[in-house]
Amino acid sequence: MKLDGKVALITGAASGIGHQIARRYVEAGGRVAIADLNLDAAKAAAKELGGEKEAIAVAMDVSNEEQVNAGADATAKAFGTIDILVSNAGIQIVHPIEDFPYSDWKKIMAIHVDGAFLTTKACVKYMYPQKSGALIYMGSVHSHEASPLKSAYVAAKHAILGLGRVMSKEGAKYGVRSNVICPGFVRTPLVDKQIPEQAHELGITEERVIKEVMLGETVDKQFTMVTDIAEVALFLAAFPTTALTGESIIVSHGWHMN
């Protein structure tokens, strides 16, 4: 699986899953734009991956249309085009719905759903004229399942699945594929933050949150790893034909099975 100089814009790529995907893309011969809210962290990540020939840093609040458009244009200016979008930026906030602040609901929707929409719109203007491209969205098992305390997140991840499917149809005549990666619980700072929050809301120990809530439905009681997600992201980016599109690929140690 090689990328042979293809250019990827990856959001939320200064750390976690996004950073591992960027690393794997560079290893496979790709060039990446590390788009992140934290520009200093994005610059450090780009430097770590080899510098300006392989990776650049882009400041991007994915819920801000001007920043998204500027970041996409900066990526195309630096590398000539955009071949791959990985819409990965995301957050998690948990509350029972009766206590869920509307401001937090809107924040989750803005980052996950608005962000996916805006980055898609900004990138297809480079993909459509060249008659090729890959749109890769970071969904979740929660694109298919529901969990207590996660009304906003589950709704957002279902929306991303819908957007990805629409784009497989709209992008087809331009040779642009669209797929959604749906991880289970990946041990990242985002997940670590949830453990004490869910323990508090559910009135159980943190150990029980891990064993029963997060890993209880997996076949082997294992977390999904960032490296697992990066391999799937490379597979989708490097797939050689337009046959693989409109799909959601679930990477969850068997938590959810289609």
Image (spheres, grey):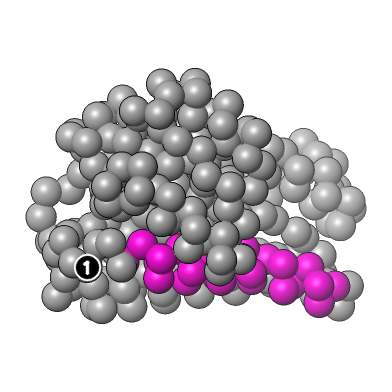
> Residue 28, percent across and down?
26, 29
Q: Which of 22 and 142 is in front in this view?
A: 22
Q: Is residue 7 visible to us here?
A: yes
**Residue 244, above or below 209:** below
Residue most toward the front? Answer: 77
Query: At x 14% / y 64%, what residue is drawn?
Result: 131
> Residue 71, percent across and down?
48, 53
Query: At x 68% / y 50%, what residue is drawn?
Result: 213
Q: Nearer the viewer, residue 32 or 209?
A: 32
**Residue 60, above or below 206:** below
- Tell me the chief SS of the magenta region: helix
Which span of residues is magenta-colored? 101-124
The quarter in which the N terminus is drawn is top left
**In this figure, which residue is indicated by the disc labeled 1?**
128
Q: Can residue 75 be found in the magenta stretch?
A: no
> Residue 31, percent across and down?
32, 36
Q: Which amino acid does label 1 sit on?
A: Tyr
> Residue 125, percent across and down?
30, 68
The quarter in which the C terminus is drawn is bottom left
Secondary structure under the numbered disc 1 in the rendered image: helix
